[in-house]
Image: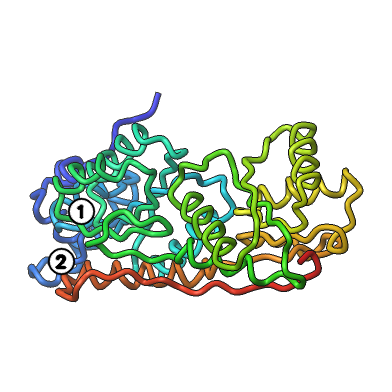
Amino acid sequence: MKSKRISLADIAESLSISKSTVSFVLNGKGKQFNISPTTQQLILDKAKELNYVPNFFAKGLREGKTQTIGLVLADISNPFYSELSKAIQESLYKQGYSLFIVSTNDDDTMELKLMRDLILRSVDALIIAPCNGIPELKPVLDETPIPVVWVDRIGDEFADFVGIDNSKEAGKLVGLFTVKPKKVGIIHPQASGVMTVRLRIDGAKEACQQQGIQFEKLCISDDPKVADEQIQQLLDQGVDSFVSLNNKVALSTITSLKRLKVAIPDQARLISFDDRESFSYFTPAITALRQPIAQIGEETVARLMDRLKESTEQRKHLMMECSFMARGSH
């Protein structure tokens, strides 16, 4: 059975001195309050002997800050969010902050609960890549004065946001094929209601319309057999170029094309929205749009640090540019 947590009172009682004296010493204020070096050392030795661990949250409540930030992500299993959380954590560490990460699985109910949990843990601020239920979040955020920065998905037009213009970037891809498409297949994941996916679909469709290019929209199946049938149907309808709206569906699309023995890029071309490290190892290598994930993380933290300093600068949306990784599939 575990022993109880050692408190300041336990140390004070064992040494027959006041709790406040122990507190001053363990908070590095012994000299400031004229506590003798002998007494300070006695307290430090006793704390070590008893395996005293400071109550992090109690200390944070006393000081009005915990040096922790809450990061609310839509899906931590998504490589984009894994890389983003790494960039945010590294940037926060340099600023002396720790990070609590929660993943909502794009579930509005879970998102609300996890956000409340983070707020109850007295995080100093929140970084949020929200689900689609933005109106449901606002009452929760209005209950707390802590700063919030939205990342990847815009949560509030009047709040700080760092990310990319998904509609604009998706639209660019339509005009980047080596040969002008006769017909484009816009391939998207099943979560087509997700904000970023919806914007990418709209951007690709609008670009096709502006350039006089026909298009078909497809929600590709996770079942390889069904996916092959779907891709074959698009090929039969005259689709010769594919814009896959994230790296997961890009993998599904290109593997279906290979199983169907379609020569890439001679018979069909493909560009992925979102890059992946493995894409350069395919034959042909997969052409992709790369988001500046590290820079998004760094700028998100920079914006948050300004808010923690109570900056009065007007809230703004920082839209970052993507890079086009021209390989062999387009």
Q: In this view, does 30 lie to the left or right of 163?
A: left
What amino acid is at disc 2?
Gly
Q: Residue 42 at x, y = what percent?
A: 23, 57
Q: Residue 165 at x, y = what percent?
A: 45, 66
Q: Residue 262 at x, y = what percent?
A: 88, 52
The secondary structure type at the circle numbered 2 is: loop
Q: Is residue 132 left or right of residue 13?
A: right
Q: Hey, which quadrant is residue 114 in on the image?
A: top left
**Front residue (pair 19, 313):** 313
The secondary structure type at the circle numbered 1 is: helix
- For image coordinates 19% across by 40% down, the residue present is 10
What amino acid is at disc 1?
Gly
**Front residue (pair 46, 316):** 316
**Front residue (pair 11, 42):** 11
Report crowding for label 1: few under 14, some 14 to 19, many 20 or more residues within 10 A (C-alpha).
some
- Asked whether the beta carbons under mark 1 and mark 2 sit within 8 Å of each other, the answer is no
- For image coordinates 8% across by 68% down, the residue present is 33
Mark 2 — residue? 30
- For image coordinates 46% across by 42% down, the residue present is 193
Mark 1 — residue? 60
Can you tell which of label 1 and label 2 is closer to the viewer?
1
**Residue most toward the front?**
212
Task: Compute the Cα span from label 1 to label 2.
Answer: 20 Å
| Chain-order first, disc 1 or disc 2 | 2
